[in-house]
Image (tube, rainbow, N blue to C red):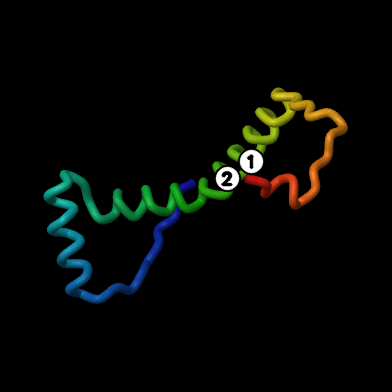
């Protein structure tokens, strides 16, 4: 379902945006629609990225054994 959205913007900003959109062979409407879609999907992408990292970490199955180090040992040069 598509819904119309009304926003308020300075006339000079809109004029400049329209000129730039013409240069980019698009419209201000298409640009804003893309921005809103990206904004809405951002949370989903972040969750997918976290899930991917968790999968990779689980697949790695890193085993470091039972060895522990003291702070001094770790910073020894």
What count of labels does the image hold? 2
Residue 8, given in percent of the width and then of the height, sits at 33, 73
What secondary structure is marked by label 1? Answer: helix
Q: Residue at x 52, y 48 (%)?
A: 42
What secondary structure is marked by label 2? Answer: helix
Position of the C terminus, as image quadrant, is top right
The residues bearing labels 1 and 2 have C-alpha atoms spaced at a distance of 6 Å
Q: Is residue 30 above or below residue 8?
A: above
Relative side of 42 to 34, left or right: right
Relative side of 65 to 33, left or right: right
Q: Residue at x 38, y 52 (%)?
A: 35
Q: Is residue 61 above or below residue 29?
A: above
Residue closest to the eye, 56 or 16 = 56
Are the residues tagged 1 and 2 within 8 Å (C-beta)? Answer: yes
Residue closest to the eye, 24 or 60 = 60
Q: Residue at x 64, y 41 (%)?
A: 50
Residue closest to the eye, 35 or 75 = 75
The disc at residue 50 is 1
Can you identify the residue that label 2 sits on? 46
Residue 26, given in percent of the width and then of the height, sits at 21, 46
Q: Is residue 16 above or below residue 64?
A: below
Residue 16: name its quadrant: bottom left
Relative side of 50 to 31, left or right: right
The disc at residue 25 is none
Residue 31, given in percent of the width and then of the height, sits at 30, 51
């Amino acid at each position: 379902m598509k819904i119309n959205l009304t926003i308020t913007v300075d006339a000079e900003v809109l004029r400049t945006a329209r000129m730039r959109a013409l240069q980019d062979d698009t419209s201000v409407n298409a640009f804003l629609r893309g921005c809103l879609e990206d904004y809405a999907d951002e949370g989903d992408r972040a969750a997918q990225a976290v899930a991917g990292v968790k999968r990779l970490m689980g697949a790695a199955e890193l085993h470091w054994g039972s060895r522990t180090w003291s702070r001094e040992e770790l910073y020894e040069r």
